[in-house]
Image (cartoon, helix red, strand yellow):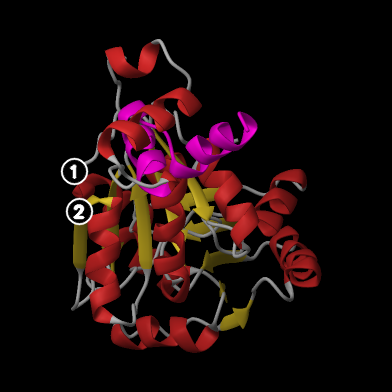
Amino acid sequence: MRTELQIEAANGRGGLGPGSALYLVATPIGNLEDITLRALRVLKEVDLIACEDTRQTQKLLSHYGIQTRTVSYHEHNEMTKAAELVVDLESGAKIALVTDAGMPGISDPGFRLIALAIRHHVPVVPIPGASAFLAALVASGLPTDSFRFSGFLPAKSGQRRKLIESVKDSPRTQVFYEAPHRLLETLADVCEVLGNDRHVVVAREVTKLHEEFLRGRASEVLEQLKARGEVRGEVTLLIAKAESREPRAESSSVSVAQRVREIMASERVDEKAALKKVAKERGIGKSEAYREWQRSK
């Protein structure tokens, strides 16, 4: 099966080749200039553009004078709409799939249509471009040699904390999307589960007018955002990989409970303060130190 590039080369021109194809077109995540020449050409030449939100896509199309017909394709109608679009593709149509921003299928609708098109032997052609999590990652200052993108964090606190706990000892940078109204709660969970000193980056409104990167320890970034009151805009949260730690002499030979009692006695502090210090010494979350302390009682 020939790719679009091979088809275009065979035709000796820039236009789309013969036959149907589903084009996965990346669109800007903020700045309208972040679209490729190839993407613009494809959007002009296809028969139909399937959009997550036709009103949002129309802003982009109007900006570039593109008059291609659009149809709605989103998470609430994709079960039925995917089948309808594949029928059109099998009839020879060329269809572009776009989302409101970024690459179709990345934390956005698209997977059902893509999978169905492949099952029906319809060529699927990616048209690469802007992606929020990649833009945030490369500008974060965190290691990019090994990373994991996990989409949106769970909205429910218990599920979110469980996921955060699972990356405590991860050797790679973790990348998530997060809703702005949940960001403070999520950062508080990071502090509690991974420790106040875990390095994080909050990338907000990437490529837009108010683009911002907040970099630092989780507790510092949390306090910065708390001081503002309300967080707005699109947010990508990055969590640094676990730091390698040399075992401390005072913590390697005694249990958490013993160490807590030692600190309470020698420094005349309460249980909460002692637990916080032990958690920091051992590079564990306060919640884990607390569980160890409770098990010893």
The quarter of the picture where residue 53 lies is bottom right
**Residue that numbered label 1 is attached to:** 141
Which amino acid type is shown beneath numbered disc 1?
Answer: Gly
Residue 191 included in the magenta stretch of the image: no
107 vs 45, left or right, is right
193 or 250: which is nearer to us?
250
Label 2 close to label 1 by CB (< 8 Å): yes
The quarter of the picture where residue 223 lies is bottom left
67 vs 65, left or right, is right
Q: Position of residue 54 (x, y in %)?
A: 53, 85
The range drawn in magenta is 272-297
76 vs 69, left or right, is right
85 or 171: which is nearer to us?
171
Reply above or below: 19 against 205: above
**Residue positioned 38% across, 47% down in the render:** 270
Q: Can residue 20 be seen?
A: no
**Residue that numbered label 2 is attached to:** 215
Q: Position of residue 275 (x, y in %)?
A: 41, 40
Q: Position of residue 178 (x, y in %)?
A: 45, 63
Q: Secondary structure at mark 1?
A: loop
**Residue positioned 31% across, 17% down in the render:** 250
Which quarter shows the N terminus? top right
